[in-house]
Amino acid sequence: MTNAPRSGLAAVSTAILAMSRHLEVRDVLKTIVASARELLDAEYAALGVPDDHGGFAQFVVDGVSETQWKAIGPLPRQHGILAAMLHQATPERLADVRKDPRFEGWPAAHPELSDFLGMPVADGEEILGALFLANKRRPGHQGGCGFTQGDEELLGILAQHAAIALTNARLYERSRELTIAGERARLAHELHDAVSQKLFSLRLTAQAATALVTRDPERARTELHQVAALAAEAAEELRAAVVELRPAGLDEDGLVATLSTQTQVLDRAHAAAVTFEHHGVRALPAAQEEALLRVAQEALHNALRHSGAAHVAVVLARRGTGAVLRVTDDGKGFDPATVRRAGRHLGLVSMRDRASGVGGRLVVESVPGKGTTIEMEVPGG
């Protein structure tokens, strides 16, 4: 292999470390493309992940503005040079992609590409995608392709590590899907047990009240109060389950907007005042945003249902490249010495698992009669 300069090896190392930090497939793809474009000083970079129907399941670009990308139109099909890389697993280095016999044109809004370097991303025999660069900004030599043999070798190294990062991200997402499926099954079981019991009790109490209306109105009134209390408990069980099962909408709205909306809803629905503040928060990897949201939901649920708080404050703030979430209530608190028992009751074990699962940490502070603070910090990407 051509010996890469020290700066080139350092750049490859930086790109590989950047890819390994992410757990979500989409985040990994974006990092691969941005790293390849910067590493090889190209004007444009893209990576396509094929589907099973002649198109692309995902297609990520770098160097094209959002306005340009929308003007280009639908994702490309697997044809021409892209198809060759996906089916033959061989690199492509061309002086002018437009003059290649396999070139089939592009939409009117598509940027003009000339010199071209393409590299399959493969895991053994399986081709995971096609990574390609175009328009070398500082060509390695005049005439012919601006991308050099050394560029091709560097991109090959990057593609090998990209395959590992992409495979790991897919395994992580699959694992999370199984975890979510398990959680849904657990919730369904708990929902069935808790709400069914409440409704059964509700039915019996209502029947008793009906029988007592004429011969013992006072006792019937007491039974009807119990009906109202049981109905409220059943509604609370359902509300908690729905919050847990409902998609968070993080992809569309982001963490700040999602938390803002949920705290506003809770503020209207409960007697306690629920407030939300955010300070300088940047977008985080998707897994971290979901974990922060779920911990916030659990902490809010505990504060509103168990603490008797008059005020619950949610604060999300930037900390380094990451973020810190703090949920504080002025409720009855609990004794940390009994944290093992309280932990099961308040879902602290689940919250700690969510935090550690994304490289974060969870701290719980509580004093009887002086409220509780739950803080979760994540390092960012």
Image (tube, grey):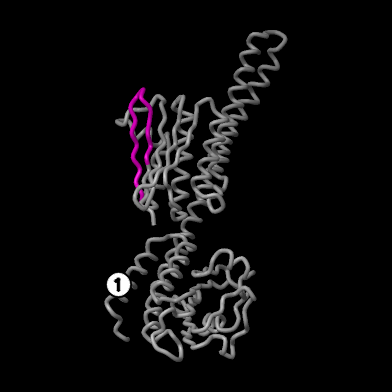
Which is nearer the eye, 210 or 335?
A: 335
> How many residues crowd mark 1 within 10 Å: few (<14), some (14–19), many (20+)?
few
Q: Position of residue 138 (x, y in %)?
A: 41, 80
Q: Is residue 317 magenta?
A: no
Work out whether residue 189 or residue 138 is closer to the camera in this orientation and state it.
Answer: 138
Which residue is more in the foreground, 273 or 186? 273
Residue 134 position (above or below residue 249): below
Question: Quarter of the image containing the C terminus?
Answer: bottom left
Residue 205 location, quadrant: top right
Report the magenta residues as a range. 359-375
> What percent of the width, then of the height, locates residue 360?
36, 49
Quarter of the rendering containing residue 266: top right
Question: Is residue 173 at least partly visible in the picture?
Answer: yes
Q: Total of numbered circles in the picture? A: 1
The residue lying furthest to the right in this view is 214
Where is residue 143 shown, x and y percent of the image? 45, 91
Q: Which residue is mark 1?
A: 10
- Residue at the extreme left: 6
Task: Give the residue displayed 53% in from the left and 71% down from the top.
Answer: 49
Report the quarter where the N terminus lies.
Answer: bottom left
**In this picture, residue 157 sits left or right of residue 48:** left
Q: Where is residue 361 shown, x and y percent of the image?
A: 34, 46
Q: Secondary structure at mark 1?
A: helix
120 on left or right of 107: left
190 is higher (above) or lower (below) than 290: above
Q: Is residue 126 visible?
A: no
Say which residue appears at 46% left-offset and 62% top-offset: 27
In the figure, is residue 150 to the left or right of 51? left
In the rendered structure, does residue 371 fall within the stretch colored magenta? yes
Amino acid type assigned to the residue bearing label 1 in the image: Ala
